Amino acid sequence: MNLADIRKSPLFKELSDQELQQLVDNAKRIKLKAGDFLMKQGEPGDSAHVVIKGEFEIQIQSGQSLIKIDVRNPGEIIGEMALLAKAPRSATVISVTDSETLCISKEAFENLLSTSPSAALAVLHWVMGRLTQNESLLHQQEKMAALGTFSAGLAHELNNPAAAAQRSAARLQETQSKWLDTTRQIESHAANEGRTDWLNEFMLHAMERFDNPNKLDALEKIDLVDQLQEWLEANNVDSAWELGPAMVNFGWDPASFVKVKNELKELPALFDLAVQWLGTGCLMMDLLFVVQHATDRISQIVRAMKSYTYLDQAPILEVDLHEGLENTLVIMQHKLKRNVKINRDYSPELPKIEAYASELNQVWTNIIDNAIDAMEGEGELTLRTYEADGRVIVEISDNGPGIPEDIQKRIFEAFFTTKSPGKGTGLGLHLSHDIIANRHHGQLLIESKPGHTMFKIILPKRIN
């Protein structure tokens, strides 16, 4: 075998010809056809492979899918990290074309390291570089995963008001058409009966009520709707079940209609038109308020999103921590809706601080998301802020099961996670600690016992 092929690998390029020959003598050649598996995720990492010929695709199992993450070509090495760590394979490797590798066994690799200091040093440099590369990649994946969670939550939050606005707008168009037709009919009928003055006064009164809808609690509204609906049905009003709730919202009750009926006691047809005109108008205004409320909610979410990400702004800003926490809660509303009660204990005199705003919001997101998961979507989340010793403090607490003491010591380690496979990368709290400690020169502390877990973030007012 040509030693130049082996020397293409950065891992072996510093080895002498004698050391390379020793490696080749203790290795074996493996030939594969397109589609063959070189190694599978989870298998023992008992060998490394140098690609001599062909192309290999590296994939990671995610649920039922294999996700492509990298490609290896001639001169590159595969499987060395699992071999060095004596760990299971972290990925699956498939031959894309007819390929050939040099398989280096655990024994051959260890023999090379034990007999050649230069080989050991080369491997150390390689491993440090690969670890740095892998951690950088995983940091990026964690950010992308957070972005995916953020996007999913944002889509969920936007979908509800958008759907409500769409449904109400469709009904509004239909209701408006009916209301205009009824307006034409009642104006014509009132003119024929000589009651134009009465109609003008009635419409003016109705318009005043349209501008001042009632604010009713749920139980009070139910009682009023039942009373009005019963009266409308007793007086043979069509669609009483649909018009009643809308009329109650604008202050109409049986007594109001008794007065109108008495004014038109000799004109039952005009009375029927008046009730239909009024009911359709109330329904139209109701739908308009729903559309307005939905679009206001969309605007609120978009404002929170822009503030959360601090789009088009400098990375270091004067930050209102309360605003950041509240924007994070808006973005995560889809998870909080389950059965999570929010308790706020904000200091009214908390000063703004100098900070990397979007990175702090990532910290709030990571900690709150973990708290919700720990409580399994049901419990109390408490946010507290105050100033002490010239620094600002944010405490985020939950009443979940707590974190065992032996785990607390490792909670900020990279890749350490207590979540089941596929649900956590072990980088969320590691990145949060890095953002607080290294980027902001603050502290991220944890206190936990059954029924109470608190993350305490201590931040300076200025980044030195």
Image (spheres, helix red, strand yellow):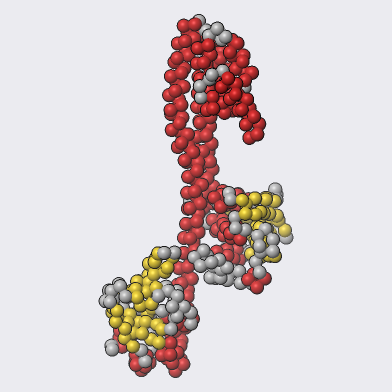
Q: Residue at the location (33% across, 80% down)?
A: 51
| Quarter of the C terminus within the rendering | bottom right
Q: Residue at the location (56% across, 26% down)?
A: 244
Residue 158: x %, y % from top left: 49, 45
Quadrant of the rendered image containing residue 383: bottom right
Residue 84: x %, y % from top left: 47, 83
| Residue sticking out furthest to the top | 194
Front residue of this view, candidates 6 and 46 = 46
Quadrant of the rendered image containing residue 24: bottom left
Q: Residue at the location (47% across, 75% down)?
A: 131
For residue 343, above or below residue 33: above
Q: Work out whether residue 233 can be spotted.
A: yes
| Residue sticking out furthest to the right | 389
Horizontally, residue 400 falls left or right of residue 311, namely right
Horizontally, residue 145 falls left or right of residue 71, namely right
Q: Work out whether residue 251 can be spotted.
A: no
Residue 342: x %, y % from top left: 65, 50
Front residue of this view, candidates 294 and 324 = 294
For residue 398, above or below residue 233: below
Residue 1: x %, y % from top left: 28, 89
Q: Residue at the location (32% across, 75% down)?
A: 36
Horizontally, residue 48 falls left or right of residue 35, namely right
Label total for image: 0
For residue 229, above or below residue 88: above
